[in-house]
Every structure is written in structure tokens, then in C-alpha cells.
Amino acid sequence: MLEKLFKLKQNQTSLKQEAIAGLTTFMTMAYIIFVNPMMLADAGMDHGAVFVATCLAAAVGCLVMGLMANYPIALAPGMGLNAFFTYTVVGEMGYSWETALGAVFLSGICFLILSLVRIREWIVNSIPMSLRLGIAAGIGLFLALIGLKSAGIVVASPATLVTMGDITAFPAVMAVLGFFLIIAMVQRGMKSAVILSILIITGLGWVFGDVHYNGVVSMPPSIAPTFMAMDLSQVFEVSMLSVVFAFLFVDLFDTSGTLVAVAQRGGFLDEKGRLPRLNRALTADSLATIAGAALGTSTTTSYIESTAGVSAGGRTGLTAVIVGLLFVLALFLSPLAGMIPAYATAGTLFYVAILMMSGLVHVEWEDLTEAAPVVVVCILMPLTFSIATGIAFGIISYAAIKLLTGRFSDLNLGIIVLAALFVAKFIYG
């Protein structure tokens, strides 16, 4: 049955090899089962229900990807998108988390349609590569700021807007230690560096009496508080449509970039540099987002951590299926998830920021018309505490700079329309 489903011999792999790859991928991305509930709880969602939704959404996404597209690509609620959900849509714009889930659901439907009718390429190609790199880096800086804030390293100041907090306080010290541990373990080639760091810092918190032991294993909490709780009544408002677009936009490019990166690492591209079964992979990703919204979590997307499993020998969808089954087993770790303090995940957010900013090396810094919009995105995302605002200003600045410098040929219809829509949004609210 496994041979028929995944073509193991054809892909020169085995059950043992795929199992090792699946375990490797899971260990590199398992931090999301601790970080995501904590972040969405800031939006007012039930921590236990989000924990279950996170595990189930990841399991569904991995199983669909593995069985439908036969790629060793794992999925889970995405970092950055959960921050946008909590701190922009709910925190800044004032929508309820139920409405935000409705926006995620609608963005998943739109993603599915785009995948089925094959116009994804036009949308992807309409956004310049420099802006794509800038958006990823901006989200990384945004996550870094959230991590610093949660650890008390950066605090508000009436005089300077932000300033350094008490870095000798226990949460700040533990956050810094956690970050150093991740970097040291990753540099030494340890695949489970992130999750080990979270567990070590939580253990130290327990030793020093800051964390209370509640057990490790139990039956999963109820998912009822978030299951099918999405509210679609406001998602077609003008201001909310921009939110839907932002969810769709970030997921689309994040997924595309991840698929290409994993495919290059695993040698899955054909002789023309294209990924076979691309539409199946994109369809699986969009279905995972729809299922995740129904379960009660922010956008579910493909994880770049899948490259760890590919490097460990993963070649087929069986790797993804094994990751999905491990997320099902993780459902029984809810007491452990509830013990994780914010400072234990702060270092993780800072580490993810490093990964997301690495693409800036490919920006054409000598061309100011390309570099300036990237800097606009990177600075405005964290300073406005809004991913959507950063994207909007980046696109507007790109179009304006190209027009004013006479570089009309660098613009296309898509970027012009997007810039005009964002300008209208800022003018008319």
C-alpha cells in the first residue's frame, strides 16, 4: 500500500528513511504547538482550544500534502500570519477573533480558486522579487519585536517611544539564554534545537519557581471554544477585504517560496526548473488553511523547516504523513503546552526573524529604486506594528519611485492596481 501511494522504490527511499525524515521535520517545527496558542491567546482565544486546533490543522495539512501531492513538505499555522492575526486584525483594527478567522477562511477559499484556475503565476509575478524579500524580512523584524516585548527586553517609553527594559529580570535573562541556546545548537547541527531550547528554558523556570508543573500528558482540551467559530458577516467590508488580501498575499508568497526552496534542496525540480504537481501542492496548502480556520487557528501554510527532513532523506509524501501523525500524538501534551512561559518562546521568535531576514542578501542594493521600497517595508512593519501597513507602504513606494524615476518598464498592471487600491484605502479609510 505504501509503495502504491508514495512510490518509495521509484524515489529511492524506504519506510525507515522516510520515518527518520518525518521525525526530523517534526522536531524542527514542533515549537509551533507552544508558540501559536500563546500568540492567539493574546487575541482573546481559548489557549487549550487553539492548542488542539494547531495540532489538528497541522495534521490535516501534512496528511493532505503527503497523500495529494506526494511531497515531503509539512504544514502548520504560520509564524508571521499568526502575529498579523492577533496584533493587527484584532489588536490594531479592532475586529473580533471570530471575524479574523472568517477572513482566514475566505483567504483559503480564494487561494484554492487561484490554485485551481492556474492564475497564481500572474499574481506572483506581479510583485517584484525585491518586495517579496522585503516583506519576508519585515515580518521577521515584526516577530523579533514581539519576542523582545514579551520578554520585557523592549518596553514602551513616553519620551523615546520604546526603550530597554530591565534586562536583569528573570524573563529577560531566560529569553536571552534561550536565543543563545538555539543559535549554539543549530550551529552544531542539532535538528531539534528550537524545541529543546523551549523545553530547557521552561525547565529552568520550573527550577526557579517561576513555572508551575501541571504534568506532561493528558487528554486533549476541548476544541469547542474555537471550532467553527468563524464569523463571515463582516469579511466583505472594504476595510476587511484588505485583511483578506493580506492573508492571501503573505500565504501565497510564503508557500511559493517554501515549495521552491524545499524542491531545490531535494532535487524535485524538472529539467526546466519547474516543480511537478505544483498545483496539487498549492491545492493542499489552501485546503489546510480552510480546515485550520474551521478548527480555530490562523493561516496554515507550508514550513521551510521541511528542508531539515529532506536533508535527512525525505523524498516522498510519506515524510509529511509521518509528521502529521506526530502532530496527532502531540495533542496529548496539552499540560506541557500550558506551562510554557512567554519568555521561553521569545528566543524562538528572534531566531525565526534571522531566518526570514536572510533573503535580504539577494536585494539589488546598488539600485535605489529596488532597495528603497525594501527598507520602507522592513522599517514600517515593526514600527507601525502592522504587517498589512508595511506591505501597503512598500507597494505604494515601489510604484511611486519607479514612476518618478522614469522606470515605467519595471511596473506591471498588478503592482499599479495594488498601489492605487492601497492609496484609496489610506485616503478613505
Image (spheres, rainbow, N blue to C red):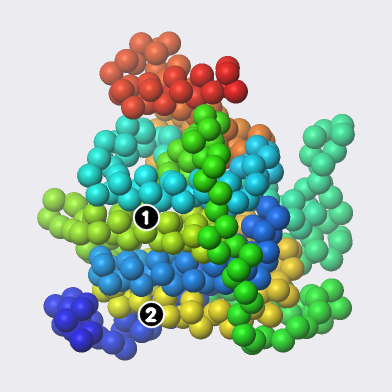
Classify mark 2: helix, strand or loop: helix
Which residue appears farthest toward the front when viewing the image? 233
Q: Is residue 242 above or below residue 96?
A: above
| x 37%, y 26%: residue | 415
Image quadrant where residue 224 sits: bottom right
Q: Position of residue 341 (x, y in %)?
A: 74, 68
Kindly identify which residue carries mark 2: 322
Q: Above or below — where is 165 with respect to 212?
A: above
Q: Is residue 351 visible?
A: no
* Residue type marked 2: Ile
Q: Residue at x 69, y 80 (%)?
A: 335
Distance, label 2 to label 1, CA atoms, is: 20 Å
- For this rendering, which residue is in front, 204 or 108? 108
Question: Image quarter for residue 386?
Answer: top right
Amino acid of disc 1:
Ser
Q: Where is residue 274 drawn, in percent x and y?
A: 19, 52
Which mark is in front, 2 or 1? 1
In this rendering, would 24 be left or right of 82? Answer: left
The correct choice, above or below, for 68 with respect to 403 in the image is below
Q: Give the vertical position of 204 relative to 264 (above or below).
A: below
- Pick the quarter of the image with the N terminus: bottom left
Front residue of this view, candidates 424 and 407: 424
How many numbered discs?
A: 2
Labels 2 and 1: the sequence-earlier one: 1
Residue 107: horizontal and vertical position, in percent?
Answer: 43, 46
Q: Crowding near pointer 1: few (<14 within 10 Å), some, many (20+)?
A: many
Q: What residue would you read off at disc 1?
A: 286
